[in-house]
Amino acid sequence: AQSVAQPEDQVNVAEGNPLTVKCTYSVSGNPYLFWYVQYPNRGLQFLLKYITGDNLVKGSYGFEAEFNKSQTSFHLKKPSALVSDSALYFCAVRDSLRASMDTGRRALTFGSGTRLQVQP
Amino acid sequence: SQTIHQWPATLVQPVGSPLSLECTVEGTSNPNLYWYRQAAGRGLQLLFYSIGIDQISSEVPQNLSASRPQDRQFILSSKKLLLSDSGFYLCAWSVTSGGINEQFFGPGTRLTVL
């Protein structure tokens, strides 16, 4: 089974400060990990993904995420937050073992979301 | 480039009325297609997925159904809406590449059942 947890419902940060949105996962094989952002009344937008290779992944809008296998985490980070970063952020995972064995479902498992509020 | 469309963008329907939400994808062939529901601006619940025409799998038993009459068209339906069907409905597509299966989402439909 594959699962993902976002332990914080909301993260508040002042503009210009660094931000971190936490994500932990559980898979049987190796994880494929994703971050998405959702602005009010909009669909989800892809930010970045980790498949293999460097543990630090850089994505859109200055975001990056660090894959930590020992801690089974994939936290989203940005060195300097902007008010416009305020949105709902989703972490998602797919188990590589499931990907190779189960060609039917092919869906990601999403976390419950973390609302990021950046104050001016 | 690929694009995904959903319509309508918003919909207000009375309890007991039928529903039809449409999703179409352009610029790709034989995509995997998904319907999600998002309640109260939080987590995503996978409702249906499809790996091909007329091939639909349901994740959660409920008052809804899905159909895929064409390769790049995915329809979410109901014969009689319930109050609990209110929510934000998202369509997504993916193409499996080495099992990675990155998903791309449409703009969503806000459904309010009164």
Image (cartoon, grey):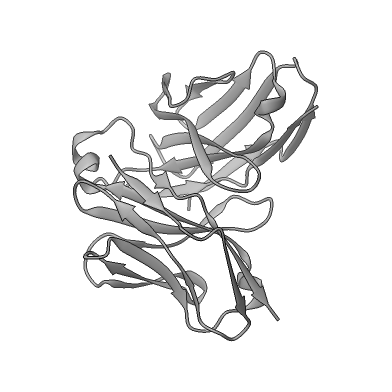
Image location (x, y in percent) of residue B91: 54, 39
Count of numbered circles in the view: 0
Query: What residue is at 43 percent from the left and 27 percent from the top?
Result: B59
Residue B73 is left or right of residue B54, and the answer is right
Q: Residue at x 52, y 54 (%)?
A: A113
Could you tell me if residue B69 is visible in this image? yes
Quadrant placement of the N terminus of chain A: top left
Relative to A37, residue B15 above or below: above
Residue B13 or B32: which is nearer the viewer? B13
State the image coordinates of residue B5 (x, y, percent, origin top left): 60, 42
Q: In front: A74, or B94?
A: A74
Question: Residue extending furthest bottom?
Answer: A16
Question: Residue A98, percent across and down?
Answer: 23, 40
In the picture, which quadrant includes the C terminus of chain A? Answer: bottom right
Corner quadrant of residue A108: top left
Q: Residue B63, percent across and down?
A: 59, 18
Nearer to us in this view, B102 or A27 = A27
In the image, taking residue B17 as reference, residue A33 lies left or right, namely: left
For residue B79, which quarter of the picture? Answer: top right
In the displayed structure image, the side of residue A22 where residue B24 appears, left or right: right
Q: At x 19% / y 40%, what residue is drawn?
A: A100
Q: Which of the two residues, B7 or B49, is positioned nearer the viewer here?
A: B49
